[in-house]
Amino acid sequence: MEFKLNPNGSMSSEDPQAKDAPSEGADEGPPDLYVEPSLAATAPAGPAAAGDVIKESNAPRFAEDVIEASRQVPVIVDFWAPWCGPCKQLGPMLEKLVRAAGGMVRMVKINIDENQELAAQLRVQSIPAVFAFKDGQPVDAFMGALPESQLKTFIKRLLSGAKAPLELNLEEAKAALDAGDAAGAQALYREIQAQDPTNPEAIGGIIRASLAAGEAETSKALIKSLTPELTQKPEVAVAISAVELFEECGAVGDIDALVKQVATSPDDHQARFDLAMAYFGAGRTADAVDALLEIVRCNRTWKDGAARVQLLKIFDTLGPADPVTADGRRQLSSLLFS
């Protein structure tokens, strides 16, 4: 199966055998533009460097710079030549739009005079000819110099549903933290903050990762350096709650002693509250939630709803994906609205 550019500018696959036998009376039309499977088959391992948003390439590097690189972010390939007037108009416009995309798309420029064999393989019959590659496959193309408005549409179509590199990095950092790799997550979040100093997800991630790594003082120092506006961001506020919760847990007594006190005085809500904090500090999150839910069940207004407030802090700290959060929220809702 081959990938071709139709005369109307659309992309489609084509059976090579069927192409060799055109229907009787059909117009020959402009030459097809397609990618031979052999180009992808020779791809060496490893994508192009992330910083190469716009680069020159050639036939030997085509698989690496285009096919493999497009598995990371979409790649636009511009076939041009120094003597091509329309190329001189199209190229700078494309470069400007690619740079404006902030790393969400890359551009590879190929001089067909220096890469005639590659141009022949792709059946580039006229230039400028532009391909778009995504996930290792060509997905769109056009020939000729288009106005900037159409180029924007071309790139927008290519990026439909695509995630920005920053978003992908944040996902990687969160995955590391969720997997228990606090040091790795901390390093990733710091890299993101170096690029975007006020990114709330990165700041919140550093606070949480530092706390998980046993570096509570690092978390508190970062919190003190933040502007009031940043501390109100949801991602940062949740992380601050985690630090506050950690400090509260460190101030409570011994679990065994508190268990005995609660058993002796079931209505001692302060003792049960302290027990919940001791449980949380020991990593027994489900027990902590159960203890706080019991306070809500017995007296939801105790200390202006302190148990409910603490439950919400715990849920925010654990995150919505944690089973303890899901079950705890369900039980809390049942108690509050029954």
Image (cartoon, rainbow, N blue to C red):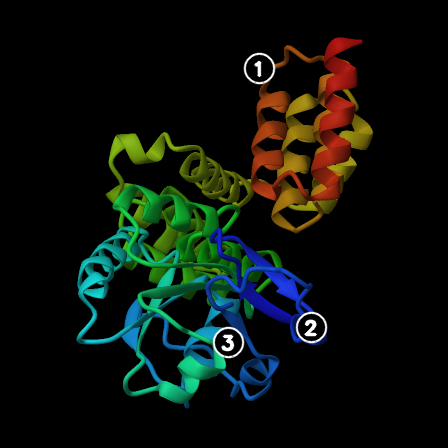
User: Measured along the vertical axis of the image, is residue 305 above or below residue 243?
Assistant: above
Q: Position of residue 74 (x, y in %)?
A: 45, 61
Q: Quadrant of the C terminus?
A: top right
> Could you tell me which secondary element the residue under label 1 belongs to?
loop
Where residue 68 is drawn, which disc sits there?
3
Q: What is the three-letter code of the residue carrying label 3? A: Glu
> Could you tell me which secondary element the residue under label 3 belongs to?
helix
What residue is shown at x 58% (from left), y 67% (from top)? 3
Please indicate whether residue 57 sits to the left or right of residue 162 in the image.
Answer: left
Tell whether label 3 touches label 1 (CB within 8 Å): no
**First of labels 3, 2 by sequence position:** 2
Q: Could you tell me how far apart the alpha carbons at marks 3 and 2 are, in whole angstroms?
A: 33 Å
Residue matched to label 1: 303
Q: Nearer the viewer, residue 300 or 6?
A: 6
Please indicate whether residue 66 sits to the left or right of residue 287 in the image.
Answer: left
User: Measured along the vertical axis of the image, is residue 224 above or below residue 21?
Assistant: above
Please indicate whether residue 59 sits to the left or right of residue 224 in the image.
Answer: right
> Could you tell me which secondary element the residue under label 2 belongs to?
loop
Q: Position of residue 156 (x, y in %)?
A: 41, 45
What residue is shown at x 71% (from left), y 47% (from top)? 284
What crowding class fits label 1: few (fewer than 14 Cα within 10 Å), some (14-19), or many (20 or more)?
A: few
Residue matched to label 2: 21
Q: Quadrant of residue 79?
A: bottom left
Q: Nearer the viewer, residue 275 or 120?
A: 120
Q: Quadrant of the N terminus?
A: bottom right
Q: Nearer the viewer, mark 1 or mark 3?
A: 3
**First of labels 2, 1 by sequence position:** 2
User: Measured along the vertical axis of the image, is residue 324 above or below residue 139?
Assistant: above
Observer able to see residue 156: yes
What residue is shown at x 64% (from left), y 63% (from top)? 13
